[in-house]
Image (cartoon, rainbow, N blue to C red):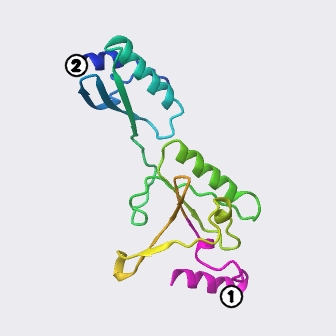
């Protein structure tokens, strides 16, 4: 096997949405060959690409049918995730995109939508963090089965302050006011304000 022959074979693999082959689209990188073993990375347009398995199977079949029927083919995936952020990025500088799920009324399903949205993105290959900022009745800890757990602290924050390490469940990093305060904390009037100050101090 040679790199030229492998790339020629992969030129028969079409990207369904873009209407061209993955070699012409420059989606193939890090190609390595060692005997019958070949490995390469396909750069997707999004980590949540629904055609990922289709592209993987097409790549494996192309190499085995057109280059070496005994080849062991390892297809890795990455994605060029674009960012729509237009702020200065002073806050959360490493986060490419922020999706806010909000409503002025309680009990309409904000947490349910946010949790399912996060799960769908994570299963599609995205790196996801879910911040539950509902101080009236945070439900994300219940939805993710981490009720009663507490995040850990680690050194390294600015001005000598520690950093809160989020919990992780189902591949999603989680943070919620419900993980920082006691469930019996009063959530009305001054009690709610004391809870917020306690969690942030």
Q: Is residue 4 above or below residue 96?
A: above
Give the residues in magenta: 175-201
Tell me residue 81's x, y (percent).
42, 44
User: Could you give the CA–CA distance between mark 1 and mark 2, rounded to whole angstroms?
Assistant: 71 Å
Q: Is residue 132 above or below residue 162?
A: above
Which structural element holds mark 1?
Answer: helix
Proximity of marks 1 and 2: CB atoms separated by less than 8 Å: no
Which structural element holds mark 2?
Answer: loop
**Residue under the image location 69 percent in, 86 percent down:** 191
- Which residue is the extreme one toward the right? 107
* Mark nearer the N terminus (1 vs 2): 2
Q: Count every numbered label the image shows and give the total.
A: 2
**Residue under the image location 38 percent in, 24 percent down:** 22
The residue to which callout 1 is attached is 190
Density class for disc 2 (Cα within 10 Å; few <14, some 14-19, many ≥20) is: few
The residue to which callout 2 is attached is 2
Density class for disc 1 (Cα within 10 Å; few <14, some 14-19, many ≥20) is: few
Tell me residue 61's x, y (percent).
42, 18
């Amino acid at each position: 096997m040679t790199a030229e022959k492998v790339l020629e074979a992969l030129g028969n693999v079409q990207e369904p949405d873009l209407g061209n082959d993955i070699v012409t689209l420059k989606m193939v990188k890090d190609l390595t060959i060692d005997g019958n073993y070949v490995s390469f990375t396909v750069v997707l347009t999004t980590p949540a690409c629904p055609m990922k398995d289709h592209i993987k199977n097409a790549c494996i079949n192309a190499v085995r049918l057109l280059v070496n029927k005994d080849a062991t083919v390892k297809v890795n995936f990455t994605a060029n995730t674009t960012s729509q952020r237009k702020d200065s990025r002073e806050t959360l500088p490493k986060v490419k995109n922020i999706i806010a799920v909000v409503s002025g009324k309680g009990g309409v399903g904000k947490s349910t939508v946010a949790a399912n949205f996060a799960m769908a993105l994570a299963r599609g290959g995205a790196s996801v963090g879910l911040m539950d900022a509902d101080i009236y009745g945070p439900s994300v800890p219940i939805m993710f089965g981490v009720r009663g757990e507490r995040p850990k602290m680690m050194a390294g924050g600015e001005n000598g302050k520690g950093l809160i390490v989020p919990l992780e469940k189902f591949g999603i990093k989680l943070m919620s006011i419900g993980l920082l305060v006691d469930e019996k904390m009063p959530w009305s009037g001054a009690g709610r304000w004391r809870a917020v100050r306690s969690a942030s101090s």
